[in-house]
Amino acid sequence: MKKTLYFALLTVFSLSTAPAFAAKSSTNATETTTEATAKLSESEISNYRARVEEIRDMDKSEMSATEKMELKSELKDIKETMRRDGVYFYVGGSTLLIIILILLLV
């Protein structure tokens, strides 16, 4: 009796988790399409780069602490925007290892 009840509960719980995971993936698909349309243009990227170079070339020794904090937060915002909207390619260590092995074996 206990075994039957255990398997029945296990089956109910395992079957109820599948729709929950399926719902999450559908919302991610819509977020991905909206992110793809919000890419930065080349002029915006060059403006951000020019601003970063301008901030780096500033003489910060005569600035107050609040001005330095504002510049730092501006740089963080630019960095976040460039990472979020820019193009970058990530290859994991195991993927890189597999690619190298395939190239060596072929």
Image: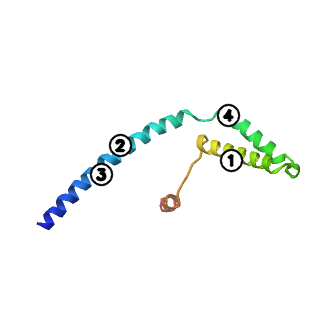
Report the residue marked by disc 3: 17
**Disc 3: CA contacts within 10 A as few (<14), some (14-19) or many (>=20):** few
Q: Earlier in the sequence, mark 3 or mark 2?
A: 3
Q: CA distance from mark 4 to mark 3?
A: 44 Å
Q: CA distance from mark 3 to mark 2?
A: 10 Å
Specify the amino acid type for callout 3: Thr
Between 10 and 44, which is closer to the camera in this rendering?
10
Q: Nearer the viewer, mark 2 or mark 4?
A: 2
Q: Name the residue located 69 percent from the left edge and 37 percent from the top edge.
A: 45
Q: Which mark is residue 23?
A: 2
Most extreme residue toward the bottom is 2
Q: CA distance from mark 1 to mark 3?
A: 39 Å
Specify the amino acid type for callout 4: Glu
Question: Mark 1: which secondary structure?
Answer: helix
Report the residue marked by disc 1: 76
Q: CA distance from mark 2 to mark 4?
A: 36 Å
**Disc 4: CA contacts within 10 A as few (<14), some (14-19) or many (>=20):** few
Q: CA distance from mark 1 to mark 2?
A: 33 Å
Q: Earlier in the sequence, mark 1 or mark 3?
A: 3
Question: Which quadrant is the N terminus positioned in?
Answer: bottom left
Q: Which mark is residue 53?
A: none
Specify the amino acid type for callout 1: Lys
Residue 2, compared with residue 75, is above or below; it is below
Mark 3 and mark 4 in contact (Cβ < 8 Å)? Answer: no
